Amino acid sequence: MSESPKSSLEESIVAALSGDDLRIFPFLPYLLQDLWEMGAAPGDILQLVQGNFPGRRGLKILDLGCGKGAVSIQLAAALDCFCHGIDAMPEFIDEAHAKMQEYGISGRCRFECGDIRSQVDAWSDFDIIVLGAIGPVFGDLQQTLTTLSGCFNEKGAVIVDDIYTAEQDDAVESGIGGKPALLDHIDRAGMVLADEIVRSGAEVPEPNREMLTLIEHRARELMKAHPQHAGLFANYLTNQREETDLLERVHNTTMLIKKRTIL
């Protein structure tokens, strides 16, 4: 989380979904149509919620950049809680609504399409805010936590999915910092890391490679349908492959962060 939050909405979406060319934006729903879980692992988030809010019923959870609703829907299905998901891609929200009906939890989830950057002042008193690998929408981690500090209550938490490297050479090459940098950002925001689940990239190569294969298949279909844009789709695939390779060399952390004053 190191980029400026001042980019356009479409630029932010493209960057969060591993693109670097704004022209790919209208093709993203097609490229990602076979994926439901994108980014954060719903199972890890569920584990953190259950471990840190034991026995709590009626939790209010705000899922920012919710994608197709995988996290919210699986939390609502497993817990007696209410989840409000927001994402800027209308096609993703449509799929979230369909999945919500499929799971039979329409009374426990609400999904809406919108720009989370323009809505932040309207949120308050949530128990949990989820940021599942959506990129630096609000700035770096310190800026993000500071921005969201008024959106969750004093006993609540923010769950953030991020990556870090233990190898300084990799950090220089990729622009990814180490764990101390994440902890420093949390501290400067007046918060503490209360719990986390850490997985090395080597632990989860197969799911990442399976997702890459699905995206490659759709990209080839688009190359045939729109040969004039073949280079655009090839570039997106290159970005996806590079990210998949990178994720196998770093540590992924799903962090549960609380306000320092409540501890």
Image (spheres, rainbow, N blue to C red):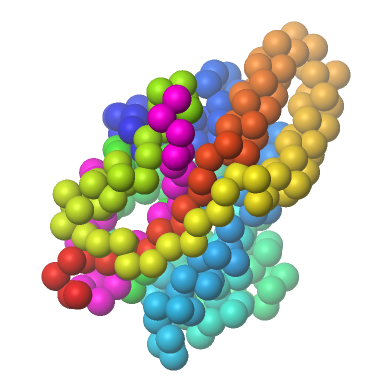
* Residue 47 horizontal side relative to residue 159, left or right: right
142 vs 31, nearest the viewer = 142
Choose top left, top right, bottom left or bottom right for residue 222.
Answer: top right
Q: How many marks?
A: 0
At which x and y percent is residue 113?
48, 50
Q: Position of residue 192 (x, y in %)?
A: 25, 62
Task: Please provide percent x and percent y for residue 152.
Answer: 27, 67
Q: Residue at x 49, y 62 (%)?
A: 197
Image quadrant holding the C terminus, namely bottom left
Q: Relative to 4, is 109 on the left or the right?
A: right
Q: Is residue 45 above or below residue 1?
A: below
User: Which of 78 and 193 lies nearest the eye of the viewer?
Assistant: 193
Task: Locate residue 234 relative to residue 247 in the image: left or right.
Answer: right
Q: Residue 131 in magenta?
A: no
Q: Can residue 23 be seen at all in this image of the molecule?
A: yes
Query: Residue at point 51% right, 49% down?
Result: 252
Is 153 magenta? The answer is yes
Q: Quadrant of the N terminus?
A: top left
Return the residue nearer the eye: 94 or 67. Answer: 67
Residue 19 location, quadrant: top right
Q: Give the camera-side residue of 121 and 218.
A: 218
Image location (x, y in percent) of residue 120 = 28, 53
Q: Is residue 25 visible?
A: no
Look at the picture and state if 4 lies above or below 166: above
Q: Which residue range is magenta in the image?
A: 142-169
Residue at 52 percent of width and 21 percent of height = 20
For residue 153, above or below residue 7: below
Please tell me which residue is depicted at 41% across the width and 30% down the height of the picture: 168
